[in-house]
Image (tube, rainbow, N blue to C red):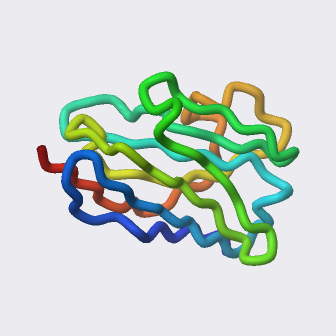
Amino acid sequence: QVQLVESGGGSVQAGGSLRLSCAVSGRTVSDHNMGWFRQTPGKEREFVAAIRWSGVTTTADSVKGRFTISRDNAKNTVYLQMNSLKSEDTAVYYCAAGDAGSFYLGQGYEYEYWGQGTQVTVSS
């Protein structure tokens, strides 16, 4: 059984930082493409960042320079370090795992497994 469990969400003031974690069981993060997405009520799910099985990362323009995706193979965990947070970063953040052969990492359909999400609230 594959499980992705996010943690690390919470409330923070604008300009602050949070680090989200995604602990994975049933799959090996270094053998899969891993992504972070976010969603707010009434809006479409938005790509945030991804890390390929090879270690190559890609980040959405809206968070570039502020957010960093990484992974710890020994812990089978993926992280999203979020700095200089803004009120518009408020959302539920989801971790996702996809096949290593997937190409369009910014698209949700490339991911097979999803976590339950963790709320991030940034107050101005």
The quarter in which the C terminus is drawn is: top left
In the depicted structure, whether residue 53 falls above or below residue 58: below
The image quadrant of residue 7 is bottom left
Q: For this rendering, which residue is in front, 90 or 110?
A: 90
Q: Left or right: where does residue 11 sit relative to residue 46?
A: left
Farthest residue, direction left: 124
The quarter in which the N terminus is drawn is: bottom right
Instruction: Please give the name of the residue rendered at 50% of the width and 43% of the height, measured from the top-left corner.
Output: 67
In x, y percent, where is residue 28? 80, 66
Instruction: Please give the name of the residue rendered at 26% of the width and 39% of the height, measured from the top-left corner.
Output: 86
Q: Left or right: where does residue 39 sit relative to residue 19?
A: left
Instruction: Please give the name of the residue rendered at 19% of the width and 54% of the height, measured from the top-left corner.
Output: 13
Q: How many marks?
A: 0
In x, y percent, where is residue 66? 47, 39
Q: For this rendering, which residue is in front, 101 or 119?
A: 119
In x, y percent, where is residue 115? 49, 61
The image quadrant of residue 84 is top left
Q: Left or right: where does residue 3 sit relative to residue 122?
A: right
Instruction: Please give the name of the residue rendered at 64% of the width and 41% of the height, measured from the top-left corner.
Output: 50
The image quadrant of residue 39 is top left
